[in-house]
Amino acid sequence: MLKTVLGLLAVLNTADACAKTLKLGDMINNPTPAAAKRVRLKGEMPEISCLSNDDCPFDRECVALRCLDVCTKDTCSEPKKCIAHKKRPHEYMCVDCVYDSHCEKGFECSRETFTCVEKDVCRDAVCSPAAPYCIQVPYKTLPYTCVQCLTDEHCPPVSGLSRSCIDNFCLFNVENNIPRKTERKTTDLIQTEDDPLYETEESLYEPEADTETYGD
């Protein structure tokens, strides 16, 4: 009778061990968050959150069966900052900045290049319909200036007359209305053989025909 009881206990222990093995196999083959949570609550095995990087979020990598942040405090050498790579999941990149606080005053961290660029004061500019465009030039108490145009495309024709954007103002293309953009320098007035800017005195007259000289 005792031998029978012992035999039954041995069979039950073997079945329980097999069941735990199966659960471990299921966890490895299907490491779903719900399954991992159930196993951790029962205390049947150590936490397993991943088997490969594919099981981890974009900014984490699989290390020792756990999803860990790709960046640590020693990943990049100062003053570089570490951030998850934009185009390669589970990898990192060393950049100049991540937050605006990493940049000097007057600069901000570009979310495209992660470098410190001049702060865009026009981002939150409030301009009127008469001058809807912003340039980063201070005006009185404002850190920006509102202007009529930035390019000729911003100056459509009015009453059939075309306009051009000159110094951020739309001016009609009529005689004497648009100032010359550049003034001719003194060196521009120097005559060259290839491209004379003015005629010489000799060129104003045709060469005279040879004439005979008679003595008295």
Image: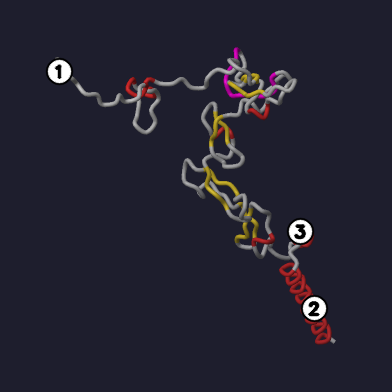
Query: Which numbered mark, 1 or 3, is in the foreground of this view?
Result: 1
Q: Where's the N terminus, which quadrant? A: bottom right
The front one of 109 and 157 is 157
Look at 34% across and 29% down and name the residue there.
192
What is the three-letter code of the residue carrying label 1? Answer: Gly
- Magenta-colored segment: predominant secondary structure: loop
Q: CA distance from mark 1 to mark 2?
A: 147 Å
Mark 2 element type:
helix
State the image coordinates of residue 163 (x, y, percent, origin top left): 66, 23
Residue 135 magenta: yes
Magenta region: 131-140
Local crowd size for mark 3, using a 10 Å CA cut-off: few (<14), some (14–19), many (≥20):
few
30 to the left or right of 114: right
Q: What is the secondary structure assignment of the residue under circle 3? A: helix
Q: Amino acid at mark 2?
A: Ala
Report the number of numbered marks: 3
- Nearer to us: label 2 or label 3: 3
Up the image or down, 63 lies above or below 192; here it is: below
Q: Which of the pair 214/68 is nearer the observer?
A: 214
How far apart marks 2 and 3 lie (CA) works out to: 26 Å
Question: Distance between the Cα atoms at labels 1 and 3?
Answer: 125 Å
Horizontally, residue 104 falls left or right of residue 162, namely: left
Outermost residue toward the right in this view: 1
Residue assigned mark 1: 215
Taking the image as drawn, is residue 147 in sight?
Answer: no
Q: Which mark is residue 15?
A: 2
Residue placed at 29% from the left, 26% from the top? 209
Q: Badge 3 is on which residue?
A: 33
Name the quadrant containing residue 169. Answer: top right
In this view of the protein, which residue sits in the foreground, 169 or 22? Answer: 169
Do the numbered discs 2 and 3 sit on residues whose CB atoms are within 8 Å? no
